[in-house]
Amino acid sequence: MEILDGKKISNQIKEEIAVEVAQMKERGEKVPHLAAVLVGNDGASLTYVGSKVRSCKKIGFESTLIHLPEDTTEDALLKQVAELNANPDIDGYIVQLPLPKHIDEEKVLLAVDPNKDVDGFHPTNFGKMALDMESFIPATPFGIMELLRRYDVDTSGKHAVVIGRSHIVGRPISILMSQKGKAADATVTLTHSRTKDLKSITLQADIVVSALGVPNFLKADMVKDGVVVIDVGITRVPDETKEKGYYITGDVDFENVSKKASYITPVPGGVGPMTIAMLLKNTLLARERHKTKEA
Ligand code: GUN
């Protein structure tokens, strides 16, 4: 069994980006600038956004955090989005999800300029991705693909079973793995809450991508020997013995599933850090695409 070490690979990617940024600076060029909009004070979102901003600083990007109060109106948020679209200094930005219930998420995501949509959530980018066109690929599935590529995991003709049909992970990873190319060319089954007899399907899987958010969901008796397991779940489980008052766990019973797996991602230290690295990669791509347009 080999661990797919997302922390190590994400550090490699961040170093590669840092080298490119240093070269941009040497040439006297503008460096990439990422902005993040956070509405409210959800604990996990604060952690993610903080981590994204810190990573920007480390690799030499400019970053801006726009932290708005929980009671921000939909109109006020749309105005903020319009300002970011119009600001030529911002190469890319994200609106951290989930948004408070009184705000229509779809309306906000539609308002983001697709050329600055480094999350790849706008229908223009999602549609282009599905059609094999150049786009921004959502960071989490992009990170999974990159992890599989860098470990040379053979996916061609393999049966990949995805658990969960979210717009952020399950749906896009099912599209990406079915496309042509490295870490792809798989035969994909997308499963969800209405899937009948899930275990009979996961038992046929050469690769399982679990993006459910239910701790300990994928157990050893649900997978075959040699399976490749990608655990996208990140759940905070309350635990007073821990300094933070919780610990982080994935969807997979790691201790037992890892005994049968050929490759497996840990939680933490697997897909999570890759998501941040690929958001930075998308921001670098955004800068390069804007530069081409400016020229
Ligand atoms: N919430 C959970 N994952 C993500 C992500 O990748 N991007 C944004 N904007 N919000 C999220």
Image (cartoon, helix red, strand yellow):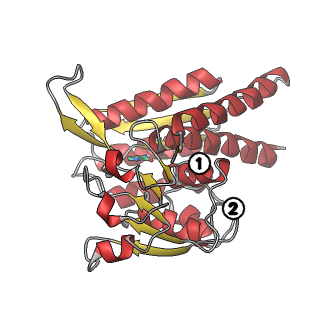
Residue contact between numbered discs 1 and 2, judged by CB atoms under 8 Å = no
In this rendering, is residue 171 above or below 143?
Answer: below
Residue 31 showing in the rendered view: yes
Which class describes the residues within 10 Å of circle 1: few (<14), some (14-19), or many (20+)? Answer: many
At x 30%, y 50%, the residue is: 253
Q: Nearer the viewer, residue 267 or 39?
A: 267
Q: Is residue 292 left or right of residue 155?
A: right
At x 27%, y 40%, the residue is: 72
At x 70%, y 66%, the residue is: 181
Q: CA distance from mark 1 to mark 2?
A: 11 Å
* Mark seen at residue 182: 2
The yes-or-no answer for disc 2 within 8 Å of ligand 1 is: no
Q: Is residue 242 left or right of residue 77?
A: left
Residue 43 image-quadrant placement: top left
Q: Is residue 36 left or right of residue 62?
A: left
In this rendering, is residue 68 above or below 159?
Answer: above
At x 46%, y 60%, the residue is: 110
Position in image of residue 177 (x %, y %): 57, 67
Mark nearer the N terminus (1 vs 2): 1
Q: Nearer the viewer, residue 38 or 71?
A: 38
* Mark seen at residue 196: none
* Mark seen at residue 147: 1
Position in image of residue 291 (x %, y %): 77, 42
Q: Secondary structure at mark 1?
A: helix
